[in-house]
Amino acid sequence: MSLIDKLQSFSVKIQPFLDKFGAYKVHLCPEVKGRLTNNGKPIDCQLISRSLNFSDGKARKDFTYTDHNGNFTFPEKTIRSDQPSIPLSEIFTNQYITSTYNNHKYIIWRATLIGQSPINEFNNKLNCLNGDINNEAIFFRFPVNSSQTNYEGTSICRWDKDFEIINIDEYFNLSEESTQ
């Protein structure tokens, strides 16, 4: 193992300790509750990984396993950040929750949380991540009422409300037309 690898490994190990200090509190992710299935049947003892990539450039990673019913949870994640508060700079967290089953990686959740405070609509989605590995990972949008904005994500999960599947071809064709 090279010196750089050793330093990176050490950095990952001490990051949770360093996250307890800083100028202000930042919410990276609410408590997560979900269930992973295969054609409706629970997948037990399955590794679920969460990566929270904050705008300070440091990734916070953790993992859990599904229980015998396919259920999994992650605790809420907050840190104390000393990232400089620069006017017009954007504070965000890229959230990724994935699992690899039979050598195929499944995106249970991928979205970008803007700001440093919780957003109810994110909390609601992340409180019921029920995905089946036979579902195609889709690009979707969901409204955030507090900001009159739509957020976008990718997931094998489906929700009954506040959930609109985006046709990627149409989405990017519209984006190309607006730049011309």
Image (cartoon, rainbow, N blue to C red):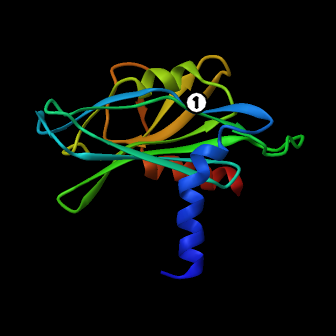
- Within 10 Å of disc 1 (Cα), the crowding (few <14, some 14-19, many 20+) is few
Q: Position of residue 20 (x, y in %)?
A: 66, 37
Q: Position of residue 131 (x, y in %)?
A: 27, 36
User: Residue at (56%, 33%) from the top-left corner?
Assistant: 151
Whether residue 24 is situated above or below residue 120 in the rendered picture? below
Whether residue 62 is situated above or below residue 11 in the rendered picture? above
- Residue type at numbered disc 1: Asn
Q: Total label count?
A: 1
User: Residue at (17%, 59%) from the top-left corner?
Assistant: 102
Q: Which residue is mark 1?
A: 150
User: Residue at (11%, 39%) from the top-left corner?
Assistant: 39
Nearest the viewer among 19 and 180 is: 19
* Quarter of the C terminus within the rendering: bottom right
Based on the displayed image, in which of its 4 quarters is residue 112 positioned? top right
Q: Secondary structure at mark 1?
A: strand
Nearest the viewer among 18 and 135 is: 18
Nearest the viewer among 172 and 82 is: 82
Q: Position of residue 171 (x, y in %)?
A: 51, 47
125 left or right of 113 in image: left
Residue lying at the far bottom of the rendered structure? 2
Q: Position of residue 148 (x, y in %)?
A: 65, 21
